[in-house]
Amino acid sequence: MTKQPAHAPHLLSVEAALAQTAEEVTQRYRTYVNPGIVAQMQLVGFNKRFVRAQGTTVYDDRGDPYLDLLGAFGALNLGHNPPEVLRAVQQAMDQPNLLQASLGAAAAALAHNLAALLPGDLSRTFFCNSGAEAVEGALKFARAATGRPVFAYCKGAFHGKSYGALSVTGREKYRAPFQPLLPDTREIAYGDPDALEQVLKARDVAAFIVEPIQGEGGVVLPPDGYLREAEALCHQYGTLLIVDEIQTGLGRCGTLFAFEREGIVPDIVCLAKSLGGGIMPIGAFTTTPAIWDQVLGGMERSQLHTSTFGGNTLACVAGIAAINAILDKQLPQRALTIGEHLKAGLAQAAAKHPELIDDVRGRGLMIGIAFHIPNSDRNRGIGSTLHHLGEEYIGSMVAGELMNHHHMITAYTLNNPAVIRIEPPLILTEQEADDTIAAFSEVLERIKNPLGLAVSSGKTMIATAVGRVVDKAKRNR
């Protein structure tokens, strides 16, 4: 038997990892993961220890239930731990999961299913592990297929934070520290076909990448017909149209793919998030045989773009089960019906507080609540402080109020922190939608301005910290 060295590190077992207290998780996250996120979570009482989840509900370490209205940014269309997906993964547990010296049966089947559901000639799929990877692959394919150097993208867009995806993401806060990014990118206004045409006229744009609805931009909907006009312009000028369905796809916006509403056929479609059924990480982009063959056609070029874990058996089986469950449960139609009910109720509550809410918008179960940001002409003083507070933190503070006073999980959108997103699992019930409307109404009645909100959030932060100390003392008795 090999003797363990005296200086061997203490390693946590799986059992010990799952049994950690909230304090232990917080301390280890601060020390070994990301201290800034710990500080942000503690600010609004988000540093809770959740230990169980099912459907639309998660439970903390005290046994208290919380309604998940965030849905992992659109990754939980079927809710937490959907039994259909778990059963499928369990069925495949004895299959080879990673075996490059073979053709993956699950990958072949999932690609077949996507081809059957997507319009036109969209029938060749590359599998990867995330949305950002799907975007990276789509950009590479567009350059290789067209021989053009430029990418066009929209102000407010979010396509990921890896290098290429970040180069076509429209928020400077995320871009600035990593400059220079990819050269030859052009930012245009979202929803403006004239702006798009001005960029395309040079005929050097490989692809225009666009979201059917800007999720992280603040749940922004383009004018009706925008995607049809974009498709026509891309065809006219020889540019490929990449539609990013990573957040909008697989039923969230009332159709299986959000672009279906306008009857277009993109050249490349990117998917991820809910494709894995909330169980396995998986991303994908699908294109036409003509474009695929220009890039990976023939044996010599067939491995120019690869991924070690892409197309693994467990992830693809989860994808097969997730899509079938979404269709069997008719979740796109459900998202549209429940979403309209929820949006109408939230809008009615918001109309009573025009000083707080600028807009309630969205489609299906992708809803954004845009808060009013106070203006300030002063460079210093409380006006300037309130403006910065509102711009960067009002969304997270309102989310904190909903979490700590109503046990409802929400968050702001990454490119627009003044917008709260409502993206629950598509299995949300009408009663849960009504509970959400009632909670939102109560928060608006109680919080009249950003300063009051800040004071309330500060109290929450103090109460959360004190509560944890008291709980720890009780356990140590």
Image (cartoon, grey):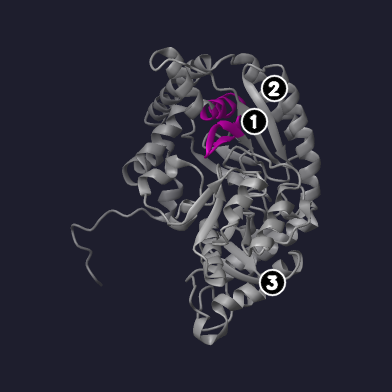
Q: Which residue is mark 1?
A: 369
Question: Are there few (<14), some (14-19), or many (20+) residues within 10 Å of tag 1?
Answer: many
- Is 216 placed above or below 5 here? above
Q: CA distance from mark 2 to mark 1?
A: 9 Å
Image x and y of residue 329, in percent:
79, 53
Say what amino acid the circle numbered 2 marks. Answer: Ala
Image quarter of residue 174 = top left
Q: How many marks?
A: 3
User: Mark 3: which secondary structure?
Assistant: loop
Residue 409 appears in the rendering: no
Instruction: Point out which mark residue 456 bears.
Output: none
Image x and y of residue 311, in percent:
56, 70
Say what amino acid the circle numbered 1 marks. Answer: Ile
Q: Which residue is mark 2?
A: 350
Say what amino acid the circle numbered 3 marks. Answer: Ser
Query: Can you say which quadrant of the picture contains the N terminus?
Result: bottom left
- Is 243 placed above or below 176 here? below
Image x and y of residue 122, in percent:
70, 68
Q: Determine the residue positioned at 59% across, 32% down.
A: 419
Write the start and end of the magenta stretch as one range: 395-420
